[in-house]
Image: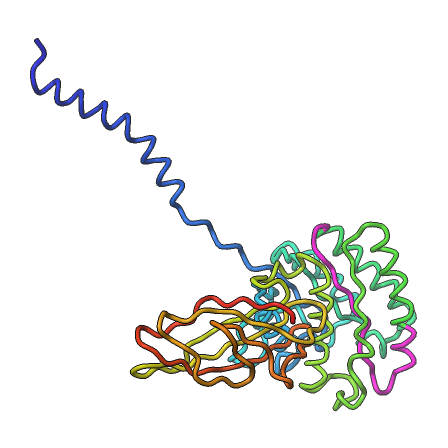
């Protein structure tokens, strides 16, 4: 007759063997999914990419991408811009020519493995000894980038004007466009970005480098180009399909609260109007609103002055709500009107 101790041990082992797989399955099922890594974007070029103390186009481009809900990480061996700039990395080397970038680009690509490259280069070649050979040098540089990183999206822009060398710049730009388009037609992930018309001479205080207004215009061109290529900067949130709405409670008091909602356009097309929908805690109601018109429980349409949103642009509306209970605003959805 087996002892009571052996019987107890055997029952315990059997129970553990029976329950362990279920516990393992439940543990695996309940493990949270890992968040997607940010898309690595390399701003590449010369001082116009570096952008001086204001961060160049990178400052406003980063702002537009974040407003559009894109998770992006600028990468490179350099870091410049204001201390408050959230992401300061880049490969913009003041004074460098196409050949100098070409001599270093493979190492940068291996080190930082960008998903997307933003290339504006050639300005310093325009007043060098061989501006006529610059288009072929650029073509060779782009071939080197696509060979090292064949799955990267490579956006190559025409260069912005130079006040004292406009004809040379125009010749360079007109020569590089067909070369780049031929690469795209051959199946390479090369995208032509026409930057030249975006920045007027009046935005170039020294005739070469943009001021803040000029850099902001460059940022808009880059953003529109990126938004037109799926996956180049990840996939933006699409709760309503064409725009996003982000609510924040900005103030509370006994019996009510104040909130603000940011409406953003992450698409490559302009919006002419928007509609945001959200819910309030039970017993709460909107008592006052600005920047929109409220109806139902709760639908807000744009005001006459803030319905039009260009790609990457955003606007806000705010409201007061009264009622009992904890103040909160549900996740909001947004759709084009």
Colour scheme used in the picture?
rainbow
Q: Quadrant of the N terminus?
A: top left
> Residue reaching furthest front?
296
Look at the image and tell me whether residue 130 can be seen: no
Whether 111 is among the magenta residues is no
Q: Is residue 75 above or below residue 311?
A: above
Q: Residue at x 62, y 73 (%)?
A: 274
**Boundaries of the magenta span:** 150-171
Q: Nearer the viewer, residue 333 or 77?
A: 333
Q: Position of residue 26 (x, y in %)?
A: 35, 39
Measuring from the top left, give residue 328's x and y in whole percent: 39, 72
- Give the quarter of the image for residue 117: bottom right
Residue 49 in the image: state x and y as whole percent: 69, 74
In the image, residue 156 lies at what x, y percent? Answer: 78, 65
- List the single residue furthest toward the top: 1
Q: Nearer the viewer, residue 297 or 150?
A: 297
User: Which residue sits at x=65%, y=69%?
Assistant: 336
Place residue 14 in its image quadrant: top left
Q: Along the horizontal axis of the image, is 281 left or right of 312? A: left
Residue pictured at 85% horizontal, 76% vertical: 126
Q: Residue at x 87, y 66 (%)?
A: 176
Q: Would you place residue 152 above or below residue 15 in this image?
A: below
Q: Is residue 155 magenta?
A: yes
């Amino acid at each position: 007759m087996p002892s009571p101790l052996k019987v107890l041990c055997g029952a315990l082992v059997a129970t553990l063997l029976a329950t362990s797989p279920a516990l393992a399955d439940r543990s695996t099922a309940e493990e949270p999914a890992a968040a997607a890594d940010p898309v690595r974007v390399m701003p590449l070029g010369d001082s116009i990419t570096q952008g001086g103390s204001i961060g160049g186009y990178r400052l406003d481009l980063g702002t537009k991408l974040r407003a559009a809900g894109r998770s992006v990480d600028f990468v490179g061996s350099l870091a410049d811009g204001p201390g408050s700039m959230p992401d300061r990395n880049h490969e913009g080397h003041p004074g460098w020519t196409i050949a100098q970038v070409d001599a270093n680009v493979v190492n940068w690509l291996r080190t930082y493995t960008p998903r997307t490259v933003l290339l504006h280069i050639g300005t310093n070649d325009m007043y060098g000894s061989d501006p006529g050979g610059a288009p072929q040098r650029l073509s060779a540089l782009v071939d080197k980038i696509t060979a090292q990183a064949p799955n990267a999206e490579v956006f190559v822009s025409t260069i912005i004007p130079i006040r004292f060398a406009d004809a040379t710049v125009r010749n360079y730009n007109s020569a590089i466009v067909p070369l780049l388009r031929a690469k795209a037609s051959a199946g390479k992930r090369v995208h032509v970005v026409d930057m030249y018309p975006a920045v007027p001479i009046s935005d170039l205080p020294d005739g070469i480098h943009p001021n803040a207004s000029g850099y902001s215009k460059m940022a808009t061109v880059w953003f529109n180009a990126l938004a037109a290529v799926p996956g180049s900067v990840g996939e933006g949130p699409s709760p309503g399909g064409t725009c996003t709405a982000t609510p924040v409670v900005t103030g509370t008091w006994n019996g009510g609260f104040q909130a603000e909602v940011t409406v953003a356009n992450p698409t490559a097309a302009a919006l002419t109007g928007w509609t945001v929908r959200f819910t309030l805690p039970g017993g709460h109601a909107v008592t006052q609103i600005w920047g929109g018109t409220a109806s139902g429980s709760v639908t807000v349409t744009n005001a006459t002055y803030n319905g039009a949103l260009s790609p990457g642009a955003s606007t806000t509306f705010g409201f007061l709500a009264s009622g009992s209970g904890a103040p909160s605003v549900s996740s909001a959805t947004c759709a084009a009107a």
